[in-house]
Image (cartoon, coloured by chain):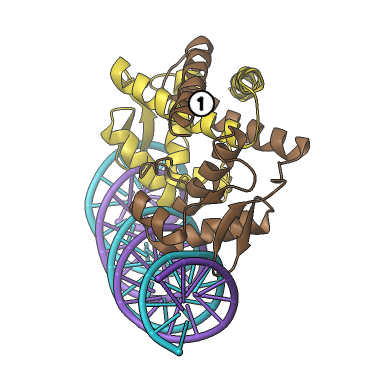
Chain colours: A brown, B yellow, C cyan, D purple
Amino acid sequence: MFAINPTDPAPIWRQIEEGVRRMIALGALQPGASVPSVRDLAKDLRVNPNTVARAYQRLTEGGVLAVKRGEGTYVADEPVQPRKNERNEALRDAAIRYASTAIAVGSELEDAVDEVESAYERVVREHRRKS
Amino acid sequence: MFAINPTDPAPIWRQIEEGVRRMIALGALQPGASVPSVRDLAKDLRVNPNTVARAYQRLTEGGVLAVKRGEGTYVADEPVQPRKNERNEALRDAAIRYASTAIAVGSELEDAVDEVESAYERVVREHRRKS
DNA sequence: CTTACTGTATTAGGTACCTAGTACACAGAG
DNA sequence: CTCTGTGTACTAGGTACCTAATACAGTAAG
């Protein structure tokens, strides 16, 4: 599926939420496809089921996943994508954080950009491999 | 000086630590220059003095700052820069996090790169303005 | 019906972080 | 010396997060 980064200061439930969104955005999870059960994914990620449940619940509220009680959880038929405004805002926020750390460790802009390109394609390839 | 982002999941003391490193990397804080006192910076950032103290202490241990007890805290004469290995590692880690969120919100690589370039120069300009 | 699997809810405990308040030792100015 | 401003240390309280252990309600298969 994907991995949890313990060193990432972001809460685990948020990493899971983002991971699912990523899979859907890359087509590794098609609309209508079933996602792992709360307990299965928790076991896979070495994490508490409650934490996965929290992420699934948020994704369901956001219209990304759809729950069939007693049966399982599935990707919504028409998964909600962030609107342009939200998307740009989130991206800009993340970009500022990244640029700030890049400067703090003494990196030039070119190096920062190179690393982003490399990381982007690496993440894409990683998901394609597991789909 | 710089700003604290409450929405950033990173601890405040870490944001302060990175902020000081950023100022030094950009030359806004020259070697030997005095940094604000714990209480002053805490007041400026609307934060508890203990939190600033924690950041200063870490920076002192890392050889970035130098303390003169009872007098104040100063930028070290030869501020320690992260070695290439650590720098690349930290940058790559940050790049993966950034690329992951960019993909999660449905952004293309080009947009992600554009935002980084924009953010980088914005951060630089922001610090130049206040130095 | 029984069994097994879903998502969901609740309670409890532990850790990290931030805040608040107080106190101490040191250096410089008046 | 007195006063003020340093960094440092300590205790206490609150919140967010993660974990653990149950329990409940719904669905599907045997």
Q: Quadrant of the N terminus of chain B?
A: top right
Relative vertical location of residue A16 with respect to residue B77 in this rendering, above or below: below
Circle 1 sits in a helix, a strand or a loop, which is it? helix
Q: Is residue A2 visible?
A: yes
- The residue nearer to you, when weighing B66 against B69, is B66
Residue B127 position by quadrant: top right
Residue A111 pos. (x, y %): 47, 12
Q: Residues within 10 Å of mark 1 (few under 14, many from 20)?
A: some
Quarter-of-image position of residue A24? top right
Is C26 placed above or below B113 here? below
| Position of residue B22 measured from the top left corner of the image (x, y, whole percent) | 48, 25
> Height in image: B36 above or below A68?
above
In percent of the image, x 59 and y 34: which residue is there? Answer: A27
The C terminus of chain B lies in which quarter of the figure? top right
- For the point 47% across and 53% down, which residue is it? A36
- In depth, the one of A71 and A100 nearer the eye is A71
Q: Return the x and y of residue B125 as percentages of the image width and height.
A: 64, 19
Tell me where residue D11 sits by quadrant.
bottom left
Position above or below: B124 against A31: above
D20 displayed left or right of D13: left
Q: Is residue D9 left or right of residue A60?
A: left
Residue A14's spot in the image, x, y percent? Answer: 52, 50
Q: Which residue is mark 1?
A: A124
Which amino acid lies under the numbered mark 1 shown in the image of this protein?
A: Val
Residue nearer the viewer, B73 or A47: A47
